Amino acid sequence: MVLLPALIRGDAVMKRRGSFALILSMLVATFSVRMAATEHPDLTGERLVVYISFHEEEGRRLLDLFQARTNVDYTYLRIPTGELVARVIKEASAPQAHIILGGTADAHQLLANEGLLEKYVPSPAEHIFEKFRSPDHYWTGIYLGAISIGINENRWKREFEGQGVEKPSTFEDLLNPRFKGEIILPDPRTSGTGYTLLASLIQLWGEDEAFAYFRRLDQNVGEYTTTGFTVAQKTALGEY
């Protein structure tokens, strides 16, 4: 079984400093000239570096679409949200990427507070509810997930059905000793998904009750993963 927390995913433009700021200014000026004759900028010869912090396949589809429209070359690194934040902060004096695609809203806001993001307003932003985008235009939500408990139906039928065990429908149900070793969770120290789950329960129950719950839940957890996506993959494969 796997817990899939709610999170507002976003994208943001990283802020370049020093010589990188000059490069960014030059690119923006070039874009404006090239766009005069076409709907999309002609970025032939330019290379875009992107940090992706959500499903890699979806990120590549978006980048492929942008490449088809602009002729830009791109390279990307798929990285968990927690590691991404630490990496961007570490690279503050010499940024290595132009764009962050995906990741939780709180992560983007943290980087904005550190002065590491440029303001950017995508054209569809006016159609997105205000609560799902930065009021200062540092990040824009691109999808919203819901907290849920994921169960591999085949494994459930094979190992639990007919044994008097009810499917878990609440967080408390996951404390059932019968689920020992059957639960996989994203690690909140590296995963934005895991952090969102922890933060959500703290908001719902208070810090003491939430941490007491996780200490008990830990007895049933078979594995903590560095990313939230991995838990869904392993559950789908029947490992949990």
Image (spheres, rainbow, N blue to C red):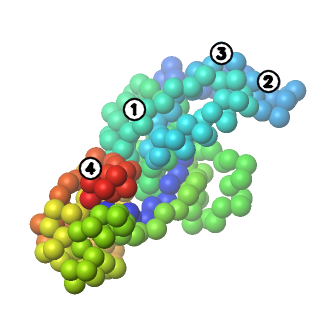
Residue in the foreground of this view, choosing between 115 and 240: 240
Q: Residues within 10 Å of mark 3 (few under 14, many from 20)?
A: few
Residue 93 quadrant: top left
From the image, which quarter does the C terminus lie in?
A: bottom left
Q: Which residue is mark 4?
A: 225
What is the number of the mark on residue 92?
A: 1
Residue 46 quadrant: top right
Find the distance from the CA under tag 2 to the CA under tag 1: 30 Å
Could you tell me the amino acid type at mark 1?
Answer: Ala
Q: Which residue is mark 3?
A: 45
Q: Earlier in the sequence, mark 2 or mark 1?
A: 2
- Secondary element under disc 3, as helix, strand or loop, is loop
Could you tell me the amino acid type at mark 2?
Answer: Arg
Q: Earlier in the sequence, mark 3 or mark 2?
A: 2
Look at the picture and state if 202 lies above or below 73.
Answer: below
Residue in the foreground of this view, choosing between 92 and 56: 56
Q: Earlier in the sequence, mark 4 or mark 2?
A: 2
Q: Nearer the viewer, mark 2 or mark 1?
A: 2
Look at the picture and state if 148 lies above or below 204.
Answer: above
Q: Nearer the viewer, mark 3 or mark 1?
A: 3
Identity of the residue furthest to the top in this view: 45
Q: Which residue is mark 2?
A: 34
